[in-house]
Image: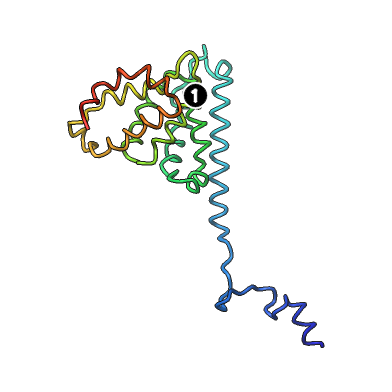
Amino acid sequence: SKEKLGKSLLGGNGTNGKTKSKGGRSKKSKDPEGDMSAANRSACAEAMHIAAITMCEQKSRLWKRSVPDETVVGLPCRIAYQMLESATGVVARKASSGDEALDMIAATVDSAPCLLNTVVAALVDLLHTYDHMAPLVAELCCKVNEKPTNILATELLREIGRLDTEGDQGGKASGIKNVAPLISELAAVRPRVVLSNLSLLLPHLDSE
């Protein structure tokens, strides 16, 4: 009949192509602003990642005597730290471009050894503040250049060995529990590095 033909042309239910759920309510469409924001974050992360790699590979052309400008080279790292703060899970890590953030930090460590102490201090501070950082930092230690040694992992263990677990540490004593998991995470992926630097952790063996 004509009525049935008209309904089929309108989407099968006479609703002009609009779909309804079982409860009779129309389904909400995706938020275009949220999708655009995620796309912008991803584009920014990709651009900073490319910049970090370029500064690593072309430092002889960019800087006089291959001595990098710490302010410029450290910019991708500062953005990467903010990305890692939001990488609390698998979904959040993808949304915040956590993988690109780790690659940016690794490229900076390899290209600018002068920034190593600054990077280590920033990572330890992140470990104090966020309980999801230990696996990320351990993964980062696997991305840096390990020849002749994994200097990032060594310096992190050295910095952890210097922590005062009994003092107040300016209000960060409660964050030490977030630093401890890094040792087990790092031992799982780089056991030789932890074993060879075990002497750095001896001051903490008698503490909780």
Q: Nearer the viewer, residue 200 or 94?
A: 200
> Where is residue 170 shown, x and y percent of the image?
21, 35
Check the image and report above or below for 106 versus 173.
above
Q: Quadrant of the C terminus?
A: top left
> Where is residue 117 shown, x and y percent of the image?
37, 22
Instruction: Write the residue at 77% across / 84% down.
Output: 4
Q: Residue pushed farthest top?
A: 65
Query: What scheme was used to colour the molecule?
Result: rainbow
Residue at numbered disc 1: 144
Q: Quadrant of the N terminus?
A: bottom right
The reply, left or right, for residue 60 in relation to residue 151 is right
> Where is residue 173 shown, x and y percent of the image?
22, 36
Tell me the kind of residue under disc 1.
Val
Instruction: Write the residue at 31% across / 24% down.
Output: 159
> Where is residue 9 shown, x and y percent of the image?
77, 77
The reply, left or right, for residue 72 in relation to residue 157 is right
Callout 1 crowding tier (Cα within 10 Å): few <14, some 14–19, many ≥20: many
Q: Nearer the viewer, residue 158 or 184?
A: 184
Instruction: Write the residue at 70% across / 76% down.
Output: 16
Instruction: Write the residue at 51% across / 26% down.
Output: 107
* Residue at disc 1, secondary structure: loop
Q: Nearer the viewer, residue 205 or 83?
A: 205
The reply, left or right, for residue 180 in relation to residue 103 is left
Check the image and report above or below for 29 versus 100.
below
